[in-house]
């Protein structure tokens, strides 16, 4: 039977505040049993010691446990992305899939998968790339999406802590890095390469034993990866446009070449019919805009369009925090919204210093 | 004799890097004796312990000392603004005024003034407001600008340190605050009210003994104030369009109501002929864009367009740092540049959460 | 029937890691039903947006819920103190009270109480002081302690968030401050004055309508207060030496006049028989040392023994974070341990720049 | 002719505040022509973008330039160490060497040297180790010290910035790291191995092409290295006890095995006769204590004496900042002073997690 994807964007007063989800269930706008994934921007630092992600997961589990059948809880992907720098607004994105008797596709399709637990010494190495590629393929299969139909792959991946590093060393295995913050970038990069492999965006021979040895010119155009201390495997959600799905939602995507390269995103928003005469999303478009997923990072050469930036030499604020707040401003200017899922660290996700963007919107004809 | 204003935007590899100024002098593009003011975005935290501003001043003094006559050094306003969050690029803006035999105004006019040293206990109080108002009037007189012709007033104002607070207390005087970071906001707010008073934007009876008691609905629309530990008085630079000045430069201004309210700025850029069909500054416009001066701040109610932001509850990153990086993204998206003079803390500078913006550009006809 | 106090100090791998508690229960070393309070040092920033405290509470509630009778959960005080700067080690302190047929006091006695929810506009005002004083009296009564027998009062108190401030303003009530970080200090100060009042350390007329108006020369000598976003009332735990309690544990206390004033603490440790010939806690003493509770803060005059410190002018790191790491080093040098409950912000808790310390230890004769 | 070393410890109100030096010159207590080196603890973050070090150097150069002969300025080593976390107090240490007709050694001896500029691609590699070793030998020769007489070698070494990395890459050379913060640790480690080589503390075959490949069990016991953006070569100062020098000053040293291992330092202070009955430095000792130089770092295994620390997983505060504030507390407790030269990052300087300490004091008999 055809399926229909639903996406709710809900506010969050704190990382453990699920009141807006409860209200949606009470109002009949959300069927807990249909939930495939929950994304959230939480207000931590988005780095190693960001426990707002774990707190969000605690709250979600406690919320869903009494509402879904035994065993179903583990199948809900919970992708917490820390960091709401600049004016970013913490929020939940609840993705559901419901049976739909009368298909009218193509429409937004959603699939999800989980990989096995990753050994600490495999992080940032070929084994991680291949594990994620297999997971992406499984999620595509679940959604019935072919590689060319995929608009975005969202991956939540693990990181190394002092304890995990010590555990690997105790077994005589050397991790790819002993720097916990750096492990986040390696994990994101490996995940993105895995998605790119599954989507056919890179050739298998591009992948090397160490992800750090893969040139940044090789990247995924439709994947955002986010690392967190709260999991040891990968949670993968694939989204695309499928003739087998129906409903009012559409998804489109773009690639920014740097943090202020909004023209491709403006074109994407225009294709979705969201922009007004001045090129910015107008009031009507804002009502139909459901979600913006984007990656942000500081370019490795220390430059934006030839001008020096200072994100990589600031020892007080992590470069990922700088990048999130900056890209939030750029996309906020364009969309007039601040509840954007801007995630930091775009290694192998778009070109160096840039990043992929996905936009989910209701189609014009479908809104009263 | 009529005057002509010149503005050079020059890169900076570090807060004490004046190589680009030296190159401009060597190439005959900069006459040290004509310099009225130097603005700089330096890469510190922009808060109390930002010593990049002092380092910039040290370097500028050492650079200009052998190039200008005895006594002239003190007349160059040096307005260092710390904080290049997000992708902001550290840079110098060198403002000069040269004699011009054949006036063809109106054109950009520049005047500057310095106030007497401010006693620590006067910071954030009526005495500071009135001192700045007098300074703004003096700078307008120097430039030959009337209040209605002024587009922007840039003020560099002092802050309180533990030592300055102790000094006041030792004399039996209680400062307006004992919180050094908070003193920056009070000083900026008092300075802005002073400018607003001189420009006729607020009525004198609005001012209260304590600046903290003045409602945020009272604000300057054409003033940016920046606090720093490196001075104890105020440096004031006034810019506007005057029929008595000539040359290719024009200045215009706008007010953002929040950090992503770019429409008024887009309109300002369009009036200056800098934008292309899509509403963004195009390549030709980018060549004629000389400087963007803007203020950024987190709104006091914790909201951007009804959505919660977390800038005021983040105890790791100061709200001013968040706001600068965010507004930098918004204005960078619009202009395609990152060497923007975005300064944090906009108390009484534009509406709460928003801020004034000024744009200096070469007129279309004047560029080959 | 007489009671016996037990205190377990247990490691914590993350703020939600209760494995060590589970192991203690499994080993019969911890009776969940006897737990009066759980203290924890968690690894957040200890400031406004420290969600590690909330995460710790989530984990504790989930842990204890199936182990204690309905209603008993709410009676366990959960005092999470964020911030493990320097070498501080995150840990749990589990305080229990068990029936003891044969009393051999005096020994450590423990009582706890909770106040009503505090209105945001009462924070930092007389109403908060009086509410805490009443709570301390209730906790003393529960433990059977007289004021002179009390060694330490631990208070967990609320803070203001942007949302709580807005809520008060919406009701037409102005909070004592609109600065969320500053609200933590006011709340701690009011709580300490409340404890001092209940212990007879200050006279009632010392208290003023605004806590900010009470001079810092008025302070509690036996109270540590810690503010957190995770509660809206106060959790109060009182500890002392009572003839009505028995068991091997003793508690003693000291007051440091600044962050390196370890001599009074060394004397306290010596009174408990924990120090060796060199004046430091020796190996035998380390085994008997159960818990160290201390408060740390930056002195308001910016000096330590006449030498300038920079904790109050550092806009990158909160002064409370500096102070915790610094005092941790001082007490770590003395005790040879890093799992110390050093809490930041000692407003009205000891003299300005100093703070109270409590030490719990097993008595020499009681250790095999 | 014999020489006499003098060391002045002077306060600093800001990184460019040389008023205390000027006062010392005016009072005849300091002969500018005799100055060999100036050390300073400045109040920056001690990491990559710490411009307080550059500001200190600017101020020192401007101060000494008119007071010393042409060319002599370059021979004064200026070792700025950023970071005054915890209660550390910013201060200058001015080291001089004066002719002394009547030798009464042994006494403190001081020598200094500068290496050639280091190419960015040599940082963290064997070339840097050997360059520093040669510099240490030159400084020992200048002071007339043999390896066994040396108590401490202070090295100021360079770091990599985005610009320096790009410059090397443009020449086709890959630096040892592209992470600017990490480059500081590699540079410090290479410098320490260089000193250890020159002092005979490690065998030449221990050194590898990449410093990162040298095990942490190989370390210098008498060297502190500090990295800074303000230089591209190395400034080296060697101190020891030499029969060829005279005067009241003595130097002794110790090695801490972790951040709270104060017993070896207490023994060192006792050998210098500075401690009282309780084992802490007493009032008389405090008057004779001239300088404490120490290194601090977070242990790589994430543990202090088996207890977990969180310094390496804190993405808000650099581990070096945590470590400085923590060790400052430990040494402050022991000495009763906060103007201690505690420097962060002790790679190959003492055992992992510990660090070397040197103490300079006036001998008991020499103080009236």
Image: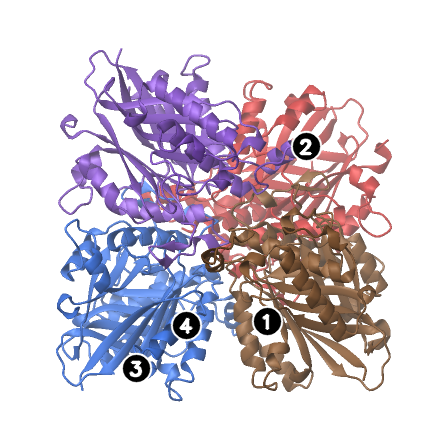
Chain colours: A purple, B blue, C red, D brown
Residue A156 visible in the displayed image: yes
Cα gap from disc 1 to disc 3, whole angstroms = 36 Å
Crowdedness near tag 2: few (<14), some (14–19) or many (≥20) residues, C-alpha within 10 Å: few
Q: Which residue is mark 4?
A: B19
Quarter of the image that includes the C terminus of chain B: bottom left
Mark 2 falls within which chain?
A: A
Q: Position of residue A286 (x, y in %)?
A: 21, 37
Cα gap from disc 2 to disc 1, whole angstroms = 47 Å
Mark 1 falls within which chain?
A: D
In the picture shown, does residue D71 fall above or below A100?
below
Q: Position of residue A87 (x, y in %)?
A: 34, 46
* Residue at mark 3 shares a chain with residue at mark 4: yes
Q: Which residue is mark 1?
A: D12
Q: Secondary structure at mark 2?
A: helix
- Disc number lying in front (1 or 3): 3
Residue C345 visible in the displayed image: no
Cα gap from disc 4 to disc 1, whole angstroms = 29 Å
- Disc number lying in front (2 or 1): 2
- Disc number lying in front (4 or 1): 4
Please report whichever mark, 3 or 4, sits nearer to the chain's N-terminal start. Answer: 4
- Disc number lying in front (3 or 4): 4
Mark 3 falls within which chain?
A: B
Label at residue B34: 3
């Amino acid at each position: 039977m055809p399926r229909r994807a639903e996406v709710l964007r809900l506010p969050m007063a704190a990382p453990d505040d699920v009141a807006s989800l409860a209200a949606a269930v009470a109002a009949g706008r959300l069927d807990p049993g249909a939930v495939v994934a929950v994304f959230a921007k939480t207000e931590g630092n988005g780095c190693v010691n960001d426990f707002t992600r774990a707190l969000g997961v605690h709250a979600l589990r406690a919320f869903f446990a009494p509402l879904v059948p035994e065993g179903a809880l583990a199948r809900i992907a919970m992708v917490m992305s820390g960091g709401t720098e600049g004016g970013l607004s913490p929020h939940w994105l609840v993705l559901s899939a419901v049976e739909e008797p009368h298909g009218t596709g193509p429409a937004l399709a959603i699939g999800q998968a989980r990989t096995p637990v990753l050994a600490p010494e495999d992080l940032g190495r070929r084994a991680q790339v291949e594990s994620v590629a297999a997971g992406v393929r499984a999620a595509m299969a679940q959604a019935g999406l072919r590689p060319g139909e995929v608009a975005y792959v969202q991956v939540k991946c693990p990181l190394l802590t002092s304890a995990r590093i010590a555990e690997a060393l105790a077994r005589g295995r050397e991790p790819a890095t002993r720097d916990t913050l750096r492990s986040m970038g390696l994990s994101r990069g490996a995940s993105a390469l895995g998605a790119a492999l599954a989507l056919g965006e890179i050739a298998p021979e591009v992948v090397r034993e160490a992800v750090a040895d893969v040139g940044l010119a090789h990247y995924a155009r439709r994947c955002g990866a986010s690392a967190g201390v709260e999991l040891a495997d990968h949670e993968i959600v694939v989204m695309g446009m499928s003739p087998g799905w129906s409903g009012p939602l559409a998804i489109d995507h773009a690639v920014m070449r740097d943090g202020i390269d909004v023209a491709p995103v403006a074109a994407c928003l225009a294709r979705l019919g969201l922009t007004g005469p001045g090129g910015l999303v107008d009031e009507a478009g804002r009502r139909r805009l459901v979600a913006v997923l984007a990656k942000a990072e500081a370019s490795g050469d220390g430059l934006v369009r030839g001008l020096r930036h200072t994100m990589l030499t600031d020892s007080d604020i992590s470069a990922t925090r700088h990048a999130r707040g900056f890209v939030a401003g750029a996309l906020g200017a364009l969309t007039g919204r601040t509840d954007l899922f801007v995630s930091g660290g775009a290694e192998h996700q778009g070109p160096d210093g840039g990043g992929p963007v996905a936009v989910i919107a209701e189609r014009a004809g479908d809104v009263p």
